[in-house]
Image (cartoon, rainbow, N blue to C red):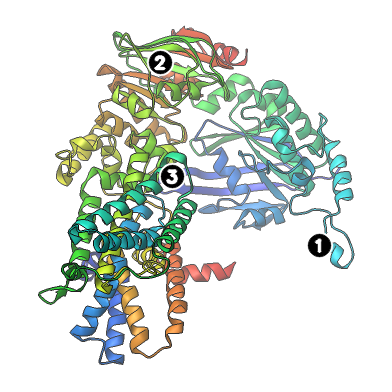
Amino acid sequence: MVVGPKLQFVNVTKKFGELKVLQEINLTVTAGSIHIITGENGAGKSTLAKIMGGVYQPDHGDLIIDGEKVRFREPADARAHGVHMLHQDCTLIEQMNVAENLFLNQEPRGNSGLGRYRINHKQLYEEADKLLSLLPVKIDARLPVSKLGLAQKRLIEILRAYYQNPRILILDEPSASLNRPEAGLLYKLIRELQQRGVTIVYITSLLEEVFTLGEQVSVLQDGVHIGTFPVKDIEYNRLLTYFAGADYKERYPKLRVQRGDEILHVEQLVSEDILDRLSFSLHRGEILGLTGSAGSGRTNLARILFGLGKVSSGVIYLDGKKTTFRNARDAIKAGICFITEDREQEGIFPLLSLKENITISDLSRVGNGFFLNRHREERIAEFYKLELGITKTGSDVKAGNLSSGMKQKLLLARWLYKNSRIFILDEPTKGVDISSKIDIYNILNELVLEGAAVLLISSDLKELLGMSDRILVLNKGRLVANLVNTPDLNQQKLMDYLAQ
Amino acid sequence: MPKITDQIWKRLKFRESGIILALLIMCFGLSLATPSFLTAFNLGMVIRQVSFTAIIALGQTLVLISGGIDLSVGGIAGLSAIIGTMLMTSTAMDPYLCALLAGLFGLFCGLLNGLLIAKIGLNPFIATLGTGEVFYGLILVLTKGYPVLGLPKKFLWLGQGMIGVVPVPVIIMILVAVIVAYVLKNTPFGRYVYAIGGNESAANLVGINVPKIKISVFAISGFLAALSGMLYASRMAGGQPTTGQTWVMPTVTAAIIGGTSLAGGEGTILGTMVGAVLMGVLTNGIVLLNISSYWERVIIGIVVILAVIIDIFRNKKENNPLAYIKKIFAK
């Protein structure tokens, strides 16, 4: 068995603008191990992985491999040192088949003269079959990648990286959106590669993966390295405390608000692609949590409520009246707003200023209906900035230059200004730093205090337990739980519904 | 306490300052090199020459900011000019009424572009490349290649007349520029144009009627192209079948040099106007310096590529182009 290199972080610090994502990280990955790096969303795991993979460069501190200081200016530098990183997104080319993808840019060639410019297809498929035999499942080398499921694609990506002879393989949440049996296949392949001498660095936010797969575990919390432990010596509860911090209950400043009238009611909603006979209601003064794993239909539901999806059957009642929305404009007119998960692509206007991003939801009130009044616009922006605690930033800053937390607040300000009554928020705190998160929770409290209703979609179960009045769980398009958030509801119970 | 020079620098460092500076340097250089540059006659000629494509460039700027491109403006200008002049010579209608109808025809052509792009979902580049070709073709169908001559005297004022010392087309250009600039900066419509070009999916989700705005933008572009076509017909005292054949490139060039981003979301009318004048001065300089006119297109092509490279620097937020070039070669 070949033993891989030892990788060390020494005092590594990384900042994005003002936000310190990693602070003075000192961490050692032992040769030949499966080393898990875990922490909550926003703890800095992915940033750490990207520094290892050469995607980011540390502001301070060093990376040391086998005692030798290295500097990766780009991923190719890292690969030259045998450090390969797999991205969260699929990087396979759908139109090509499995073998072509496996050997992309390193196809076996003919060996003489012009033959060097020819791909040797016979050898290509022989090599592919050899490589595919490492997998715990059978995949045909000639199958187009578009025919593969997500789990199989992940396996192919890992194999492709393995073919390039990595000494250290970094996997960033590779099991995301896989179910348990699928994740099991992934674990098998990872153990196989470890047997063959590859050191594995595995990023995950799922604690159970730490125990099924890991040998070493490092915990990050808000960019600080809490500690590295051998997995066999650590208990689940200890790890949970390290993971979330002892004060995690105080992070959710939940206000109990008197529940008001029913504002939205969904009856037997069916959409062709996924949703199956959903019925639930939303009240004024209520934060309704909604969760479900990827593919459960939670985003489809949000889009339908906002007039963007196709309804096959079922009825949506708004204030007791039957309603159909033809498009987003209809939904907005009815007082609904939707802040999607992807605030960069579907939220902010990066080239418009902060104030212009707020007022865009209703320009008729910025002027006389025909011409805009810039002074009034400035006053409106100042009002909402004060309201939401965006005080340190000027109104003329381009929105593209703001931090994630700031962008999220900006989007909330936009819809507050529009006087929306129903806020559909999809992962509103994803990628947001802790202090902005608390600000956002306080804004949610303000919203419900003033009689609005919030549909809070999140995969962060602690957040749902901390902020919601009721929690809905979607599983493969069906509503499997509609629970009042009482103190005896906990993460484990929700997980059970999710995994059903 | 900020230094006074810093404050001056800050004032000077607005978007268009770079290109204005380039224009001034060019004018300064030309006036040293040849005495015939800085004369009222020459400058008047340059600016009138520029005005035809500059008017279209204003519409093109709107389209580009919204994230599209209109390659059919030349065809629309030419076809509208032919239709307008044919109406004048073959009916008894007032020539200015004919010009207005030609303008409406241009608007209709733009509307057609807008529908293809916003409703059916064609790529703007391909859609307008196609319709532009149709418009050029229809010119030949209608004229069989002969110019439309014998325009009413009354109509010639539009392209040849002067108000004081200023040619009428220049006055119209300035008027249109002021209106478009004001609309772009101070109306919801203008804001939506920037918003759509900057992030179309966000624009949809915030409730902007994206197709409506896109169609409007192309319609405006079509109208301005037709207006320019009529001005040119008046200037030439006839409808020339070749009108507009070489006009597409200068309109895009003026906007790009003026700082409009091809990716959409960015650009100003002031920038486009300066860009148009700069191109005019460049062409004029080539003539005055006795450089073979065969070189004109080569030089203009290079200028366009330089302008786009500068656009890339701007997007990379690299303030110092030299440092950026070093970085490229360091790889």
- Disc 3 element: helix
Answer with left or right where residue B15 lies relative to residue A222: left
**Callout 1: chain:** A
- Disc 1 element: helix
The disc label shown at residue B116, or none: 3
- Marked residue nearer the N-terminal end (1 or 2): 1
Answer with left or right where residue A413 lies relative to residue A85: left
- The residue where tag 1 is placed is A117
Residue drawn at (25%, 72%) of the image = B235
> As shown in the figure, which amino acid type bears the numbered disc 3?
Leu
> As shown in the figure, which amino acid type bears the numbered disc 1?
Tyr
**Callout 3: chain:** B
- The residue where tag 2 is placed is A288
Taking B9 as reference, is A470 above or below it?
above
Residue drawn at (25%, 53%) of the image = B101
**Residue nearer the viewer, A205 or B210:** B210
